[in-house]
């Protein structure tokens, strides 16, 4: 069966032109997402996670542009779709949830008006039927008194409730894929946990595939089937989440896991990856992680390929081998 989403060699640049390369925020990224499965896309700030999500959705702001690669959605290359074709797909078959729900919501319209518009944008149903769908969707994401809340404006909701509304809008048309870009990062942990559980239940019921963009490995271990780790615009490790998180191969993945606070002992300094992610306009030659890596050798002046090993793949000449895990 064709995967729901197949991203191959995606390159996204900012600026540049015909003869001038731009800044490569996404540099040859390939991954697949199967129907109903959750991919956790992780990496430090600036690694290119959001730009990958925006490229798939074709919501890149100028001067951002897809400079190469393919995005096959249900077997069709949507990277070449016109803006109109893309608008048809967005909201109906692919939806996005952002860190700030106000990216989705309009502050001057009631939630009801916005949700009815969102229903009618893709389904030619009556206003009453659309209102009913909106009410049901608010109920599904745990908004109390949904009928009354339809008449409220976004500012009359708490941050957590606003994010639930944004999720309800994303789920309105039962999309095949949701790209969730750090949707719980700005919320406190209890609300975060409730929203993740509800999101998980709703997407499982509708067999929706999800790309969950985050830097939080705890969320990924709870939610995702597969993980893809990005570093400086490239994927450095991919695979089933259980395998990668318990037995990482790439030293960067291992460093990320070791720096999770719960992995550290009380009283000892928190382990962290030394140094900083290189800026995308000053990427070092070869492996971009080598300046921060204890395992690097002169051989790392060449760029390793993302090489497969069973169900996983990693981009490293000197992978971590955890014998106790095998
Ligand atoms: N509009 C823009 N113009 C120029 N460069 C940009 C623009 N948007 C993003 N970038 C660059 O693209 C790179 C990747 O950014 P991106 O937002 O995808 O990172 P991220 O991994 O999602 O980080 P974060 O977790 O902080 O959102 C960064 O180096 C960023 O500076």
Image: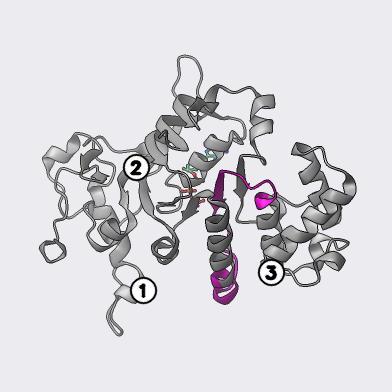
Of the numbered discs 2 and 1, the one sitting upstream in the chain is 2
When the figure is inspected, residue 178 is found, relative to residue 67, above or below; the finding is below
Q: Which residue is mark 3?
A: 142
The answer to whether mark 3 is within 8 Å of ligand 1 is no
Q: Position of residue 104 (x, y in %)?
A: 71, 50
Distance from label 2 to label 3 (Cα)? 36 Å
Q: Residue at x 82, y 55 (%)?
A: 132
Q: Position of residue 231 (x, y in %)?
A: 35, 46
Q: Nearer the viewer, mark 2 or mark 1?
A: 2
* Circle 2/circle 3 CB separation < 8 Å: no
Identify the image quadrant of residue 70.
top left
Magenta run includes residue 108? no
Residue ranking furthest to the bottom: 267
**In the image, 188: left or right of 7?**
right
Q: Is residue 141 visible?
A: yes
When the figure is inspected, residue 251 is found, relative to residue 217, above or below; the finding is above
Distance from label 3 to label 1 (Cα)? 31 Å
- Quarter of the image that includes the N terminus: top left
Q: Nearer the viewer, residue 7 or 174?
A: 174
Q: Position of residue 86 (x, y in %)?
A: 64, 30
In the drawing, what numbered circle is on residue 96?
A: none
Q: Is residue 277 visible?
A: no
Mark 3: give few (<14), some (14-19) or many (20+) Cα within 10 Å.
some
Q: Position of residue 30 (x, y in %)?
A: 37, 35
When the figure is inspected, residue 19 is found, relative to residue 71, above or below; the finding is above
Please report the bounds of the magenta region as a residue range.
Answer: 170-193
Q: Nearer the viewer, residue 136 or 293?
A: 136
């Amino acid at each position: 069966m064709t995967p729901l989403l197949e991203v191959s060699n995606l390159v996204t640049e900012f600026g540049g032109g015909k003869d001038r390369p731009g800044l490569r925020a996404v540099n040859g990224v390939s991954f697949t997402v199967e129907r109903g499965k959750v991919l956790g896309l992780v990496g430090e700030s600036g690694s290119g996670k959001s730009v990958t999500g925006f490229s798939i959705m074709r919501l890149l702001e100028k001067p951002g542009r897809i400079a190469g690669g393919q995005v096959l959605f249900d077997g069709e290359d949507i990277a070449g779709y016109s803006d109109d074709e893309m608008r048809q797909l967005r909201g109906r078959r692919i939806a996005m949830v952002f860190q700030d729900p106000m990216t989705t919501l309009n502050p001057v319209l009631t939630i009801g008006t916005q949700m009815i518009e969102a229903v009618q944008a893709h389904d030619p149903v009556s206003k009453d039927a659309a209102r009913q769908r909106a009410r049901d969707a608010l109920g599904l994401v745990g908004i109390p008194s949904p009928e009354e809340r339809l008449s409220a404006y976004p500012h009359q909701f708490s941050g957590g409730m606003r994010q639930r509304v944004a999720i309800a809008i994303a789920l309105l048309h039962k999309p095949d894929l949701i790209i969730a870009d750090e949707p719980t990062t700005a919320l406190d942990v209890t609300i975060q946990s409730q929203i993740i559980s509800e999101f998980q239940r709703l997407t499982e019921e509708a067999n929706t595939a999800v790309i969950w963009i985050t830097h939080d490995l705890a969320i990924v271990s709870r939610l995702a089937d597969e993980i893809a780790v990005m570093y400086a615009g490239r994927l450095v490790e991919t695979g089933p989440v259980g395998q990668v998180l318990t037995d990482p191969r790439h030293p960067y993945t291992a460093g990320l896991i070791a720096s999770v606070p719960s992995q550290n002992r009380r009283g000892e300094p928190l382990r962290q990856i030394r140094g900083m992610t290189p800026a995308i306009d000053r990427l070092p030659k070869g492996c971009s992680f080598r300046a921060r890596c204890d395992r690097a050798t002169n051989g790392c002046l060449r760029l390793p390929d993302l090489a497969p090993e069973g169900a996983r793949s990693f981009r490293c000449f000197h992978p971590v081998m955890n014998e106790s895990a095998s």
